[in-house]
Structure formats: structure tokens, C-alpha cells
Image: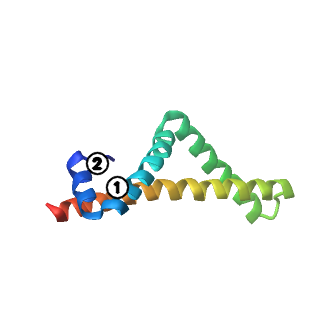
Amino acid sequence: MSLTRDEVDVFMDKFKKRGERTLSLLGKLQDFNTAVNDPLGKLLLDWLITQHELLLDKIANLTATDNEKLKYQVVREMLVDWSGKIQMYKDTINDIKKVSQKGE
């Protein structure tokens, strides 16, 4: 998912300073999004999801150790953080595209 130069120009014309902050945030999120979509990033994300499922099953079955409960909290926090960044990146791209379509 990417933006054209025209889409960015229309967005910047409309929002000026706020547009600069939005594009700065988008740049930071793009680095993360690129890393997650890299083969190693996908492998790490898949591992996190698998760990989450395994640990959640143990917790639900009341067989999790204290260490596994702590590990679950860390894995869950990472998944929430990562999914939030991925969603924010997609939402920001879509918002810029909507503004640029209305502005044309």
C-alpha cells in the first residue's frame, strides 16, 4: 500500500502543519510495516501468534505456570502493539487517499 506524489501534495495543501506531522508519523510506521512484511518479520509475527495461542490454551485450561502467565502477558502486549502499528499505518494511508480523492 503506497501513496502517489499527487496524493501527498493534495493532502499537504489541505492540512499544512498537521499534514507534516501525519507524514512524519507515516514514515516511522512505514519502517515498522516494511520490517513486519519482510520474511523475517513475518516469521517473528507468526511465532508470536503461535505462542499466544499455545499460552492462552494453557491459561484457559488452568495448566499454565506462573512463568507461562508472565510470558503470555509479554506476548499479548507485543501483539497488541504490533497490530496497532500495522492498523495505524493502513488507516493513515487510507485517510490520505480519501482526502486526495475529495480534493481533486
Quarter of the image holding residue 18? bottom left
Location of the C terminus (image quadrant): bottom left
User: In the rendered view, does 26 fall on the left or right side of 35?
Assistant: left
Q: Residue placed at 32% from the left, 62% from the top?
A: 95
Depicted 39 relative to depicted 19: above or below? above
Quarter of the image holding residue 21? bottom left
Residue 1 visible to an observer of this rendering = yes
Q: Which mark is residue 104?
A: none
User: In the rendered view, does 27 fall on the left or right side of 62?
Assistant: left
Q: Residue furthest front?
A: 17
User: In the rendered view, does 85 fall on the left or right side of 14?
Assistant: right
**Residue 49 or residue 99, whichever sits in front:** 99
> Mark 2 belongs to which amino acid?
Leu
- Residue 14 position, x and y percent, is 25, 63
> Mark 1 belongs to which amino acid?
Ile
Q: Residue placed at 71% from the left, 55% from the top?
A: 74
N-terminal-most mark, 1 or 2: 2
Q: Secondary structure at mark 2?
A: loop
- Residue 67 position, x and y percent, is 84, 54
For marks 1 and 2, give the CA distance.
7 Å
Query: Mark 1 and 2 residues: CB-CB less than 8 Å, in contact?
Result: yes
Q: Residue furthest left?
A: 104
**Residue 46 or residue 12, whichever sits in front:** 12
Residue 53 visible to an observer of this rendering = no
Label 1 crowding class (10 Å Cα cut-off): few <14, some 14-19, many 20+?
some
Q: Which mark is residue 3?
A: 2
Name the residue that disc number 1 marks: 93
